[in-house]
């Protein structure tokens, strides 16, 4: 919960499983430029005993106990929970952050990325319209990164400098050629993919999706000026 995220009990259970699975894997070699960030990310979390506690019943008991102690707050409209003390969030008083998710949709990586960035902006109080636009972009970008990565770990990097928000996602691909991928049907839903790109293009000031052949990875980059924030923003 120190990720600064909110979710229902089932979603939080998936996130716990994802965190444990990530902790047991080495960072892929094509993402080694984020090795220090990965080590810091893992050291921030305590995985001792988590394996025995990540079934839904145990997570529910833990969540309810922390709620009753006033450690977690309940977003009652959605029956979701998050850490009440925002000073304990990993994003507190930060204008940039690097974090990690996975390519297994069953563990809730899309929800994690979306919730992480939504709560990141909670400390800035941007307008609802601009936040909604950002969440649409984040969801589209994250879905593509998760869906097409052939490595378990995905890197997410985002920042807000003054009133300019930048988002980067790094996912991996194998040495199989693009033509082979198309022939195998991997991109059979390219219509929906292109539709997502068109939506993101409309909502962002800048958009770039780069296929880094040398490092076998795809880099999504998005940039948006937030008009509801002052130019010389300070938290």
Image (cartoon, rainbow, N blue to C red):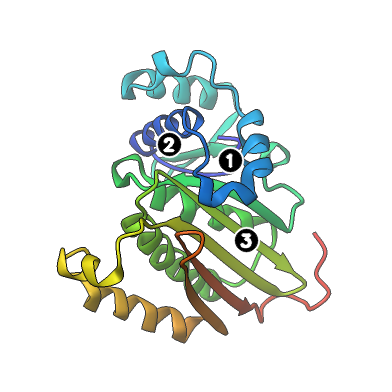
In the image, which disc is placed on residue 158?
3
Foreground residue among 77 and 123: 123
In this picture, is 169 found above or below 30?
below
Mark 1 closeness class: few <14, some 14–19, many ≥20 residues within 10 Å: many
Tag 1 and tag 2, C-beta contact below 8 Å: yes
Q: Separation of disc 1 and disc 2 at Cα?
A: 10 Å
- Name the N-terminal-most of marks 2 and 3: 2
Instruction: Give the Cα distance between marks 2 and 3.
Output: 20 Å
Mark closest to the chain's N terminus, 1 or 3:
1
Q: Which mark is residue 166?
A: none
- Residue 112, percent across and down? 46, 47
Q: Which residue is mark 1?
A: 3
The picture places residue 67, in percent across and down from the top left corner, at 52, 27
Using residue 51 as the reference point, say whether residue 31 is left or right of it.
right
Coordinates of residue 21 in the picture (x, y in percent): 42, 31
Q: From this view, report whether residue 206 is shown above or below residue 18.
A: below
State the quadrant of the N terminus: top right
Please name which of the two marks, 1 or 3, marks the residue nearer to the observer: 3
**Mark 1 vs mark 3, CA separation in Å:** 14 Å
Circle 2 sits on which residue?
15
In front of the other: 52 or 186: 186
Q: Is disc 2 in contact with disc 3, using a CB cutoff of under 8 Å?
A: no
């Amino acid at each position: 919960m120190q990720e600064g995220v909110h979710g229902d009990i089932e979603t939080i259970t998936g996130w716990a499983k994802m965190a444990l699975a990530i902790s047991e894997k080495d960072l892929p070699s094509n993402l080694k430029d984020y090795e220090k960030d990965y080590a810091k990310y893992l050291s921030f979390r305590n995985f001792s005993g988590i394996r025995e506690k990540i079934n839904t019943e145990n997570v529910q008991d833990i969540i309810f106990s922390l709620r009753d102690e006033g450690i977690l707050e309940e977003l009652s409209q959605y029956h979701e929970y998050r850490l009440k003390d925002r000073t304990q969030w990993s994003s507190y008083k930060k204008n940039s952050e690097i974090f990690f998710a996975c390519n297994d949709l069953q563990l809730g990586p899309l929800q994690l990325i979306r919730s992480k960035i939504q709560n990141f902006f909670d400390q800035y109080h941007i307008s609802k319209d601009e936040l909604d636009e950002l969440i649409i972009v984040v969801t589209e970008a994250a879905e593509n990164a998760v869906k097409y990565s052939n490595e378990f770990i995905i890197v997410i990097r985002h920042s807000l400098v003054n009133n300019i928000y930048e988002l980067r996602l790094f996912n991996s691909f194998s040495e199989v050629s693009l033509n082979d991928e198309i022939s195998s049907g991997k991109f059979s839903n390219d219509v929906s993919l292109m539709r997502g790109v068109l939506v993101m293009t409309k909502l962002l000031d800048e958009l770039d999706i780069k296929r880094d052949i040398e490092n076998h990875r795809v880099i999504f980059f998005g940039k948006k000026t937030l008009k509801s924030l002052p130019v010389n923003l300070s938290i």
